[in-house]
Amino acid sequence: MSYPVIIQGGMGVGVSNWVLANAVSKLNQLGVISGTFLDTVLIRRLQLGDLGGHIKRALDHFPNQDIAQCIYNNYFIIDGKKEEQSFKTLQMYNLNALKERLQITVVSNFCEVFLAKEGHNNPVGINLLEKIQLPNLASLYGAMLAEVDYVIMGAGIPREIPGVLDKYVDHKEASIRIHVENAAPEDKFSMAFNPKEIVGEILKPLKRPKFLAIVSSATLAISLKRKSTGKVDGFIVEEACAGGHNAPPRGKLNIDEKGEPIYGDKDFIDIEKINNLGLPFWLAGSYGEPAKIQKALDHGAKGVQIGTPFAFCNESGLKSDYKKKIIQMILDGKAEVFTDPKASPTGYPFKVFQMDDTVSDKTVYEARTRVCDLGFLRTAIKQDNNKIIYRCPAEPVDNFIRKSGDPKELEGRKCLCNSLLAGIGLAQMRSSGYLEKAIITTGIELSLVTRFLKEGELSYSAADVIDILCPQLALAAT
């Protein structure tokens, strides 16, 4: 079978939106939506008036119209909410998530995939994070209802996901184990999802999407191929220079003079071992130029995953004023990316673009009152009384310490949930009048972005990105 040479990265919250994925797939490469926080993204888009009527159009194709219309009626605001009003929020996810929350998650993933696939017959993928476990079962089912072609997953060891995809083909109940801190060896914490109970009975079998695991070592790739609950169809091999969350350095964490984690010989990825597994793979991390794509192909890869060039193109979900400002900073030689070992509540290093009026600015960060009202990055913790609580080092200090959190974990932690939503124009307005500030994540080789710009312009399209890489794509096809 044929494989895409370029896989568009599943970036951030709503940066890799349906508009971008649709554009890339129409160009015969693999467009990918980010499935992260999609339920919150959906209801906030509805509260802004569903510009263009795209959500309503997708909802009209959802197989259970009672659920679709209920969500629409509950959150849609004609002409959008007033600027000073706050967005309605959903109850935070836990092991016993409400049926309504699961339904919104299913529907939101369905809508995003449906819109990404609209108007063409080429494959579309969804990117999900293993570390955000609780919404994943509902997200996967919603994406499969819309006939998603690829599921791409990393930020952990997604060993159980292939088996989930297998069960969803026939709408069977699926479950995954949930990581709970302080759990005893005999404890078995899991979360189940029964499609019939949540969405209703659907008779037509679903298409099983291909599963690509994101890995940062040959050891992990080998383990996933041997021990996953179902078939792993390939790998995306992500190097430390890739944007967003990165696997932490192996061994003891060492920090350089700038405060960034140091990656060493232990973090070297043995591409030959991955090639020997006999499964298709793509390389990721600063591969956005023809010579590097050729290098990947020479190593046996089917192609590359590219993020940063697509993150700043016209179709991405990042706010347009941020894109223009960042591109100007790149042209002026003032762009800087910091691999922050503390920013993310997950403990994974997180690449942050340094820009005024975002939480990368220490003054802006310190001025924010800590709030945890979305909770996607919380950790489940078992207490001595066997009760499960949820804790995040970016939540209010008193709450974190009351939950037996280590105060050392609080330093520098940023609320990625609220800040990433702000980056795509869905910032929450607090009752105090404070508007949440954005955080921008990107890869480190920003200079590559300039090759897609026409003279005198500060914007470019997804087609411009593909056009620059076309000579390489033509070579790969021969």
Image: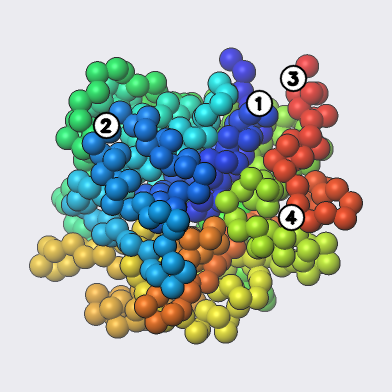
Measure the C-alpha gap from mark 3 to mark 4: 27 Å
* Residue at horizontal 53 percent and vertical 40 percent from the top: 18
**Residue named by callout 3:** 477
SS category of the residue bearing label 2: loop
Most distant residue in the right direction: 455
**Residue named by callout 1:** 28
Depth check, mark 1 against mark 4: the one in front is 1
Using the image as rendered, state which of residue 111 and residue 140 is in the foreground.
Answer: 111
Q: Is residue 46 visible?
A: yes
Most distant residue in the front direction: 78
SS category of the residue bearing label 4: loop
Depth check, mark 2 against mark 4: the one in front is 2
Depth check, mark 2 against mark 3: the one in front is 2
Measure the C-alpha gap from mark 2 to mark 3: 42 Å
Does label 3 or label 4 sit earlier along the sequence?
4
Badge count: 4
* Residue at horizontal 63 percent and vertical 35 percent from the top: 23
Tell me residue 242's x, y (percent): 63, 51
- Residue 206, relative to residue 161: is it above or below? above
* Label 4: how many Cα within 10 Å (few below 14, some 14–19, many 20+): some
Q: Amino acid at mark 2?
A: Asn
Tell me residue 148's x, y (percent): 45, 29
**Residue named by callout 4:** 445
**Residue named by callout 2:** 64
